[in-house]
Image: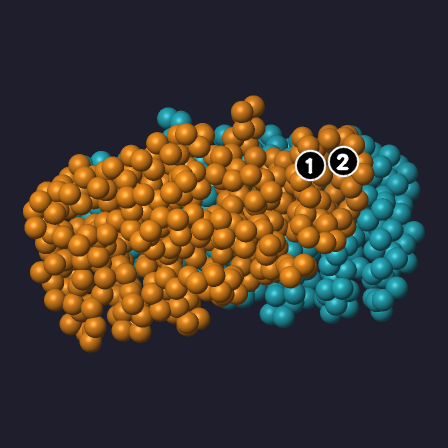
Chain colours: A orange, B cyan
Amino acid sequence: MVDKEKALKNITRIKEKIAKSPGVRFRPHFKTHQSAQIGEWFREMGVSAITVSSVDMALFFAQHGWTDITISILVNPLEIEPIILLAETVDLNLLVDSAESTAFLAQHLTPKLTKSVKVWIKIDTGYHRTGIEYGRTAEILSTAKEIKKSRGLHFQGLLTHSGHSYKAKSPGELTAIYNDTVTKMTVVREYLRENGVTGVEISIGDTPTCSAVDTFYGVDEVRCGNFVFYDVMQMAIGSCKEEDIAAAVACPVIACYPQRNEIVIYGGAVHLSKEFITDEKGRKIYGLAALPNESSPRWGPSLNDTYVSALSQEHGIIRTTEAFSRRVRVGDIVMILPVHSCLAADLMRHNLLPTNYTN
Amino acid sequence: MVDKEKALKNITRIKEKIAKSPGVRFRPHFKTHQSAQIGEWFREMGVSAITVSSVDMALFFAQHGWTDITISILVNPLEIEPIILLAETVDLNLLVDSAESTAFLAQHLTPKLTKSVKVWIKIDTGYHRTGIEYGRTAEILSTAKEIKKSRGLHFQGLLTHSGHSYKAKSPGELTAIYNDTVTKMTVVREYLRENGVTGVEISIGDTPTCSAVDTFYGVDEVRCGNFVFYDVMQMAIGSCKEEDIAAAVACPVIACYPQRNEIVIYGGAVHLSKEFITDEKGRKIYGLAALPNESSPRWGPSLNDTYVSALSQEHGIIRTTEAFSRRVRVGDIVMILPVHSCLAADLMRHNLLPTNYTN
């Protein structure tokens, strides 16, 4: 269940912060919601460029009228056929992190197109998932030159995802990661400029640092996406408050065990994903629990001393107080605030139920 | 990708073991594969009774001609409408663990039916997820009496899922859990008999203990399901060998980083789930990696010193040897043996590709 008012507030907050940073493009990541309807909320706020995390998702949003799309995963050569289709129909932005992948595109993509494709070099600024490592400047330069010499490929810039921000514990640490990211990207851009490669944009993206900073200095594009819903993990990092969390999974109670301070819900790994955080007491937390409301906001504050402590395929175990385990009844609904809203939304997206009771 | 030969071997192994235990019914759990086609493989081997883990799954398999179905999750009162529909069309087995839930069925289900419904009492033999705790015999008896006095409800027996077997480390430990489970269930049945409740069946289900034991003494029904595919977790528990694993996710390589002995695949939490095991060195393992074969078996043995070390939404990071990270190429396919095949199959089930190259 999506609380539309909260989601709109979350979108507006980031959008206004970006508006205060002149020349910065907002290209929100749609992998969090994967919803055509929620996409329209962004469009109504003036968003026209988007990010997705797979070719399938790009096809989906292209079908829903989006014409400027970045696929923020390195090009998978096995998907070249749908990439060709997309590149012909929308303004497509692709990611590479090697001269080899660039050569592949020059050989298999552009000869089949009547228009050019924008290509970004993925830079690894510390997350160590994908991208050319920040320090390997010669490799970055040779890849940039490979793109520039390829007919039909337009070198758009340097793109990073500072996913190591998910390990941060405070807004101060997040700001430090933002500053470090921008510094590294700027150093690389400067190196390229000194070597004759100009007009290079910088694109960043993770929700934690984008939530922490006040202005987006030093970058040309912001791609964060999780902020539309936020979740328990973002709350633990410090990038949102609990009341900002805009998505929850409505789970029926199927058993109450006051003798062990637990209740069991119909809501498991196939609904919430097995993502968890470990709290300061060392407990694994797979979600928080709140009670539904009749009117907006659609659920109340999370229940004290209550959390999802275990998940199997279809079941969730909630550790709670004896009082709550005696008060709640089989057949009641408990709203579970997910640890990772992107994964819960991916699992539940065919059941997404945006609620909007006041507008 | 499902290796049909391996899956058929896995089904045959359990089926033959059950056949050696006179009077024991095989009611395999279909939540692992959730596939109509794989269901037919069971049907061809003479299976006619099945287990599912949700009302939706029961509706799906009822549509595919299955007429004897156990929904092995406690009755969710909010799903009473589809339960009524199912109970009228198939031989339906439901689970309760309280007199209240039984009274709910007597009030809302049976008055609308022209036939009776089988009801099992879920017993908690040590997993502590759902069920009446083994020791609470008075509560079990009163629930049994509540079922027996309700018109249209037929008290079928006692059902348990010894999910604590997933924490076992050896076949010996698994056999001990099986023995303990059967002992507890038999004690409860004896208590019921002494109190005038007779004709009570015993149903057990977890794949680890069912894989470890030689015969199914002391029970009337076996409901395991994961064995059809097995997975890395079952291998770690000792309930299968690696060559028994019959499902793998074919993941394209999108980046190679020999400098850090890693490759990155397009294959993440939305394909494999975030389930992991921790190995003896304390490393989190989200999957093993193997190379695809042109013919059966469809993948080779898992690569030495190679495992999925991290997953984000669409990406997987594979830690490997420098040699492999230099040999593999972007665009190659790596087969990932999942840690938990039920969750991976749930995520990938619309792409399930059974392969059968020799029959």
Say which quarter of the image contains residue A107: bottom left
* Same-subunit check for callouts 2 and 1: yes
Left or right position of A350 against A126: right
Chain for numbered disc 1: A
On screen, B78 above or below B36?
above
Say which quarter of the image contains residue B105: bottom right
The residue shown at (76%, 64%) is: B81
Left or right position of B321 against B65: left
Say which quarter of the image contains residue B296: bottom left
Cβ atoms at labels 2 and 1 below 8 Å apart:
yes
Indicate which disc residue A303 carries.
1
The residue shown at (23%, 38%) is: A184
**Residue topped by disc 2:** A324
The residue shown at (32%, 58%) is: A71
- Tell me the amino acid under the disc marked 1: Leu
Residue B39, image x, y percentages? 55, 63
**Residue A316 seen by the camera:** yes
Instruction: Choose between A162 and B306: the one closer to the eye.
Output: A162
In 3D space, how far apart are the residues under numbered discs 2 and 1 (Cα atoms)? 9 Å
